[in-house]
Image (cartoon, helix red, strand yellow):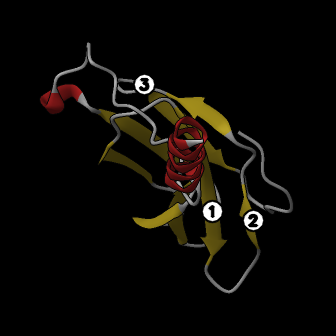
């Protein structure tokens, strides 16, 4: 009888330990912290200024502003392999979000904002 009591308690402890837990995305062990970033190069061919945010699973952060008909380069910390989306908000015009793209540390993402933006796509 005592043996079954221990098994039941162990089962309850293991079950409750797994509740509410998520599996964290591990950082790539082959990338140094100095290289754990991505480069986003943006060419804005529209005449409106574009405010950009980048989003990933569970997060959203402001990237910056790219003036109309200008280019900009952004480097952001990125130590994982995860999907990235970019939100584009043109001043007094349309707003959209790109399709997700899988990004790893060291990658370069090229984004071109076309004039007359109606839909997004990376």
> Which mark, by number, is residue 31?
none
Residue pointed to by mark 1: 87
Residue 25 on image: x %, y %: 45, 37
Screen quadrant of the C terminus:
top right
In the image, is residue 62 above or below residue 119? below
Q: Residues within 10 Å of mark 1 (few under 14, many from 20)?
A: many
What residue appears at the point 39 percent right and 31 percent down from the top-left corner? 26
Q: Earlier in the sequence, mark 2 or mark 3?
A: 2
The picture places residue 113, in percent across and down from the top left corner, at 65, 52
Indicate the position of residue 95 as horizontal and vertical percent values: 73, 72
Is 51 on the left or on the right of 27, as rendered? right
Q: Nearer the viewer, residue 13 or 34?
A: 13
**Mark 3: secondary structure:** loop
Residue 43 or 103: which is nearer the viewer? 103
The Cα atoms of the two marked residues, 1 and 3, are separated by 19 Å
| Viewer-side residue, 119 vs 55 | 55
The image quadrant of residue 36 is top left
Q: Quadrant of residue 58?
A: bottom right
Q: Is tag 1's residue or tag 3's residue first in the polypeptide sequence? A: 1
- Disc 1 is placed on an element classified as strand
Q: Which residue is mark 2?
A: 96
Residue ID at (61%, 81%): 91
**Residue 104, placed above or below residue 6:** above
Q: Which residue is mark 3?
A: 107
Q: Earlier in the sequence, mark 2 or mark 1?
A: 1
- Give me the C-alpha separation between circle 2 and circle 3: 23 Å
Q: Are marks 2 and 1 in contact (CB under 8 Å)?
A: yes
Left/right placement of residue 122 relative to residue 105 reads right
Look at the image and tell me in which quarter the N terminus lies: top right
Rendered position, 69 above or below 73: below
Q: Which SS class for mark 2?
A: strand
x and y percentages locating residue 94 in the rendered image:
77, 75
């Amino acid at each position: 009888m005592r043996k079954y009591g221990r098994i039941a308690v162990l089962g309850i402890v293991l079950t409750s330990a797994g509740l509410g837990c998520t599996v964290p995305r591990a950082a790539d062990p082959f990338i140094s912290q100095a290289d754990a970033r991505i480069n986003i190069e943006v060419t804005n061919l529209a005449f409106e200024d574009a405010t950009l945010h980048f989003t990933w699973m569970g997060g959203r952060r402001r990237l910056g502003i790219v003036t109309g008909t200008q280019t900009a380069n952004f480097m952001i910390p990125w130590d994982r392999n995860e999907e990235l989306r970019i939100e584009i908000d043109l001043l007094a015009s349309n707003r959209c979000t790109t399709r997700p793209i899988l990004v790893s540390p060291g990658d370069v993402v090229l984004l071109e904002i076309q004039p007359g933006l109606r839909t997004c796509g990376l």
